């Protein structure tokens, strides 16, 4: 999944990027509100982490402008510790969840994944498709109850398909949601990842739909 991080404290921004990248996400970082606002308006993100105290344009304004522009991705705001007014204002301005600083990275990752899942209409962290079971929270995959080891990119591609279970997902959509802005895509093209996934999961789960992309459906 592709995540936008807007945080002006460089050490925290870097920690967020590293943690989310290790969790398999593609991450773009903006260090001020102006750049973050622009990225969120123009790039397709699955979720955004938004600090409220930002240079140039504050986080609350960024959030309001996104929502006015009908940008609907889930947004988790980072608030100052103990500031209940910030939390209320943020939720009223269209935030989906909040964390007060300082927070545990594991909690942030769990909350973010729950937001992304719910945005796709899945209340539970497990997605089942025939013999395939994907646990989005644990990042684990089973076929007929046997665990399957996937690389981060393989898991991400499968997750995107699983979030659109039974529906075709275009190659453009996959590309936009799998790779951050500067990713070297050559050796990790979609076709290569899909063929590796088919080898690991077995045939019949991931269909190629001519002109429409790929679809995950029970065989
Ligand atoms: Ca800040």
Image (spheres, grey):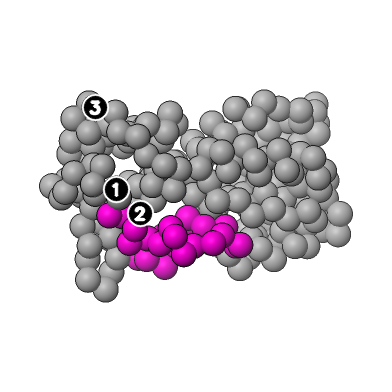
**Residue at the location (67% across, 26% down)?**
104
Span colored in magenta: 169-195
Q: Main secondary structure of the magenta part?
A: helix
Which residue position holds label 2?
193
Q: Residues within 10 Å of mark 3 (few under 14, many from 20)?
A: few
Q: Give the mark, 2 or 3, whose residue is nearer the N terminus.
A: 3
| Disc 2/disc 1 C-alpha distance (Å) | 6 Å
Secondary structure of the residue carrying tag 1 is helix
Q: Are marks 3 and 1 in contact (CB under 8 Å)?
A: no
* Residue 105 visible, this orientation: yes
Q: Residues within 10 Å of mark 1 (few under 14, many from 20)?
A: many
**Residue at the location (47% across, 55% down)?**
178
The picture places residue 118, in percent across and down from the top left corner, at 44, 41
**Residue at the location (43% across, 58% down)?**
188
Q: Give the mark, 3 or 1, whose residue is nearer the N terminus.
A: 3
Going by the picture, which residue comes out furthest to the bottom?
211
* Residue 74 visible, this orientation: no
Q: Residues within 10 Å of mark 2 (few under 14, many from 20)?
A: some
Q: Is residue 177 left or right of residue 101?
A: left
The picture places residue 163, in percent across and down from the top left corner, at 36, 47
| Disc 3/disc 1 C-alpha distance (Å) | 15 Å
- Residue 196 counted in the magenta span: no
Q: Is residue 115 left or right of residue 150?
A: right
Q: Is residue 58 above or below residue 24?
A: below
Going by the picture, which residue comes out furthest to the right?
55
Q: Is residue 42 left or right of residue 209?
A: right
Which residue position holds label 1?
197
Residue 205 versus residue 45: which sits nearer the camera? 205
Secondary structure of the residue carrying tag 2 is helix
Which residue position holds label 3?
146
Secondary structure of the residue carrying tag 3 is strand
């Amino acid at each position: 999944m592709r995540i936008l991080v807007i945080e002006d404290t460089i050490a925290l921004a870097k920690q967020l990027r590293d943690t989310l990248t290790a969790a398999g996400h593609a991450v773009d970082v903006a260090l001020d509100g102006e750049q973050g606002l622009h990225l969120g308006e123009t790039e397709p993100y699955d979720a955004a982490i938004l600090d409220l105290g930002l240079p140039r344009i504050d986080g609350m304004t960024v959030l309001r402008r996104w929502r006015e522009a009908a940008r609907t991705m889930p947004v988790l705001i980072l608030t100052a510790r103990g500031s209940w007014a910030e939390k209320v204002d943020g939720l009223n301005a269209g935030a989906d969840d909040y964390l007060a600083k300082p927070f545990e990275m594991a909690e942030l990752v769990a909350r973010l994944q729950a937001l992304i899942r719910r945005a796709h209409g899945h209340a539970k962290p497990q997605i089942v498709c025939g013999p395939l079971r994907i646990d989005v929270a644990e990042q684990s995959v089973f076929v007929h109850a046997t665990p399957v080891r996937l690389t981060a990119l393989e898991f991400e591609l499968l997750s995107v398909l699983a979030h659109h279970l039974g529906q075709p997902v275009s190659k453009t959509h996959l590309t936009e949601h799998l790779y951050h802005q500067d990713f070297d895509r050559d050796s990790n093209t979609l076709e290569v990842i899909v063929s590796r996934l088919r080898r690991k999961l077995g045939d019949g789960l991931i269909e190629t739909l001519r002109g429409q992309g790929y679809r995950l459906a029970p065989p």
